[in-house]
Image (cartoon, helix red, strand yellow):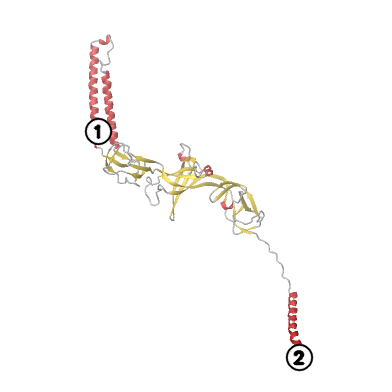
Amino acid sequence: MSKKAILLKIALPIAILLAGFAGMQLMVHSRSSPKKEVKESKGVLVEVKRVTREDLPVAVVGTGTVGAGQEASITPQVNGRVAYLAPGFVVGGLFREGDLLFRIEDTDYRLAIERAKAAIAKARLDLATIEGQARVARIEWERLRLAETREPSPLVFYEPQLENARANVDSAEAALSQAELDLARTSVHAPFPCLVRSEEIDLGQYVTVGKSVATVAGTGAAEIVVPLPLEEMQWITIPRKGDAGNGSKASVTLAVGDQVLAWKGRVVRSLREVDPRGRMARVVVAVADPYNLDRGEGPERRDLEFGMFVDVEIRGKTLAGVFAVPRSALRDGDTVWTMDDEGRLRVTPVAVVRRGRDTVVLRDGIEEGDRVVLTNISGAAEGMQLRLAEEERPG
């Protein structure tokens, strides 16, 4: 191969590389630089609520188990065999006040009444006889003019005998009253509107005085003991002695499937002691006629049965001129975030009047119409730019 061909093979690739490099440099230097754009921050998206002053009734919520306001043991006051038993006198049976529960065989007690009447007749006859003797004795004494010489002995006019005869009449009449009372006691009636909780009696059974045969719970009113934090007690009205009708009203509810059953109640008293375990005060809410014995049955009425675990909302005092905000809007150190007219975040200390389950009630620190920020912001700082995520929530 000639020297000329060798040089051509070496020089041609080098020339191509140099031409490509020169073209690249020309393109780089001929390209214009991109313009720098400074983006303006529009602020963090937030949701706000414009607050207004309002008179806010306090609702104190709690839970409790329904129980009976009264309970009594049914105990016979006379002995005897059970001759009649009310058909509904079984566990779960309901009775109105005065309804007959059972009757004890009364033959012996009717005979006792007849004996007492006979004893009264005899005692009255004896009294009449002695009164006659006393009258005769007085007439004889006066006829003989013995009164002018000395005072007569009480025995002369049968005075001790008269007192004894009158006492015998009184005793016989008392025995009749006792016999009539025993006869009345053979019929045992419901002492108050009640539910039979337990019974140990059957037809033909012999019952004795002082032995309990049943236990009944009063259905005139159900009572629910509701534990509450001590700070909640200031908002509700608890009646003092003699003011049972002046306690705070309450609503008792129970969720059953997709239904929410409700009953009206009222605070009737406080147990006036703090539970040592939970450090909770306890109030008693009463619901009248829980088994609808007075109002009658109806498809819209449901019994408030003993043992139910229910929710209780007590309507307490009204707070005047306060602001209500969601509990999530209250920040550390009892502060709230507000959005000023320029869209800047302001950290505002507030005075908390009440902390509810979902709502916080404020009195001072914010003003009518202030926009309270509801959105949680990571790294929030005073003066941060904000913008509304949507239309303001109504106050």
Is 231 left, or right, of 158 in this rendering?
A: right
Q: Which mark is residue 170?
A: none
Q: Sort mark 1 into few (<14), some (14-19) or many (20+) by Cα contacts within 10 Å.
A: some
User: Where residue 149 appears, x then y in whole percent?
Assistant: 27, 8
Is 120 left, or right, of 343 in this rendering?
A: left
* SS at mark 1 in the image: helix
Q: Nearer the viewer, residue 280 or 122?
A: 280
User: Where residue 305 appears, x then y in whole percent?
Assistant: 40, 48
**In the picture, residue 391 is in which quadrant?**
bottom right
Amino acid type shown at disc 2: Ser
Q: Which mark is residue 2?
A: 2
Q: Which mark is residue 112?
A: 1
Q: Nearer the viewer, residue 389 or 113?
A: 113
User: Where residue 125 appears, x then y in whole percent?
Assistant: 22, 24
Residue 225 can be seen in this image: yes
Find the residue positioned furthest to the bottom. 1
Amino acid type shown at disc 1: Ala
**In the picture, residue 35 is in which quadrant?**
bottom right
Find the residue positioned furthest to the top. 149
